[in-house]
Amino acid sequence: MLSDRRRVAVALAGFWTLEKNLEFSDKTALDAKTKALISLAVASQIPCQYCIWADTNTLKQLGATDQEIGEAVSMAGLTRYASTTFNGLQVDFEQFKKDLGGM
């Protein structure tokens, strides 16, 4: 049986591989700041204090402004609000697409 320390090491090895190949890679379609803003927005919704702390610090190092950080988190909240409202009211999806199709 694996020790607690070994289980954590095994789990983190896979995580770091994904981090290096996506978030920390410069060979992706999105730049580092955009990826960190998305990550912070998602982390704020989960919520994950580890990710919020790491993403905020990363964003500060990448030169993100307080306004950019605030807008990313606010957009996450707005999206969640819209989802809650439309799903809770059971808005007809086909009608929704028609109504927004002309925007």
Image (spheres, helix red, strand yellow):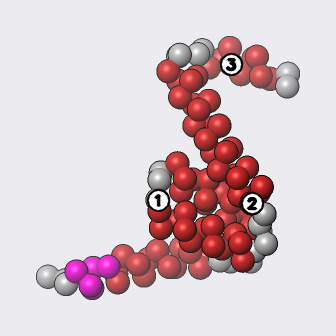
Q: Which mark is residue 103?
A: none
- Name the residue: 66% across, 73% down: 58
Dot label at residue 66:
2
Q: Is residue 17 above or below residue 72?
A: below
The reply to whether dot 3 and dot 1 touch (C-beta < 8 Å) is no
Would residue 61 be found to the left or right of residue 88 on screen? Answer: right
Q: Residue at x 68, y 19 (%)?
A: 96
Sequence-wise first label, 3 or 2? 2
Give the secondary structure at mark 3: helix
Other-residue count near label 1 (Cα within 10 Å), few / some / many at <14 / 14–19 / ≥20 = few
Residue sitting at x 19%, y 84%: 3
Q: CA distance from mark 3 to mark 2?
A: 34 Å
User: Quarter of the image containing the N terminus?
Assistant: bottom left
Quarter assignment of residue 94: top right
- Left of 103 or right of it: where is 59? left
Of 90 and 93, nearer the camera is 90
Q: Position of residue 61 (x, y in %)?
A: 72, 77
**Residue 92: % across, % down:** 60, 14
* 31 versus 61 height, above or below: above
Q: Distance between the Cα atoms at labels 3 and 1?
A: 32 Å
Task: Give, as a single range, the part of the protein colored magenta.
Answer: 4-8
Question: The C terminus is located in which quarter?
Answer: top right
Residue 38 left/right relative to 100: left
Amino acid at dot 2: Asp
x then y, percent, for residue 42: 57, 53
The residue where tag 3 is placed is 96
Q: Which residue is mark 1?
A: 48
Q: CA distance from mark 1 to mark 2?
A: 19 Å
